[in-house]
Image: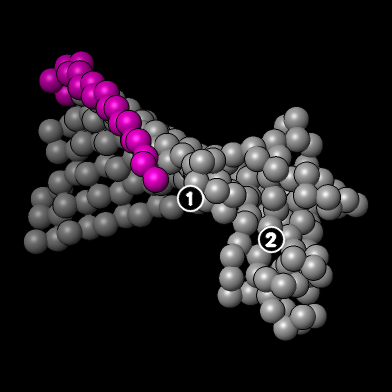
Amino acid sequence: ASFTEKQGMIKVDYQLSTKHSIFGRYFVTHYESPAGSPSAGLIVESIGGASDNVFNATLGDTYVITPNMVSSFRLVANRTSNTTVYNSYIGYPDLGITGVYQLPPSQFGKYIGGISTTGGFGVATTPSFQPYTTWQASDDVSMTHGAHQISFGFLFINLKATAINYLSSNGAFTFNGQFSGLQNADFLLGTPSSFAQAGPSYSDQHQNVFGMYVQDAWK
């Protein structure tokens, strides 16, 4: 399938004084991969695509404290989001399968959670949304003192990863041929070997990382 990707960047550099300079960087990209073509049949139509976004913003501040001491401060933000793109086609009720909970079609559209034959064909769609965000702040100070090159600084990172995955939320049937001896025959007879269904899978992870360092290079 074809895909498109668009990127953009903004760069700003400014000299406040002979001792003080700042800069900014902003980068964004968008990737789009379409779902399977509805005209290519149900198996291809059920294949999901992707809509992904990435952005990065950086602010930097460099200051000459003394002729022998320089401070470099950085503030960085990153965000990534990955979203499944899929077609709304048919659901289990359209196939005469009743009694299986389905996510609201008004919100999620119609789709098949999973129908597969062992070693044969498979039709499945899985909606998902996965955003990741990172904030980072750091300051590095470098100074010379006689024969010593001394560096020290800190780093703080805040990580956040959240995700919603609807794997098996509409239910998934597997046919392995245990009733008739043929997988596809079991499918036509409507006698699955297994059925699995689960609620949405949520992930909400947070982490803070802090570090400090001191370094002395002595000649």
* Magenta stretch: helix, strand or loop mostly: strand
Q: Position of residue 31 (x, y in %)?
A: 39, 37
Residue 208 at least partly seen? no
Q: Position of residue 44 (x, y in %)?
A: 52, 50
User: According to the image, label 1 marks what residue?
Assistant: 210
User: According to the image, label 2 marks what residue?
Assistant: 115
Q: Residues within 10 Å of mark 1 (few under 14, many from 20)?
A: few
Q: Position of residue 152 (x, y in %)?
A: 30, 49
- Residue type at numbered disc 1: Phe
Q: Position of residue 11 (x, y in %)?
A: 23, 24
Q: Is residue 25 above or below residue 168?
A: above
Q: Would you say residue 5 sits in the magenta stretch?
A: yes
- Quadrant placement of the N terminus: top left
Horizontal placement of 84 versus 75: left or right?
right
Q: Which residues are magenta?
A: 1-20
Q: Image quadrant of residue 156?
A: top left
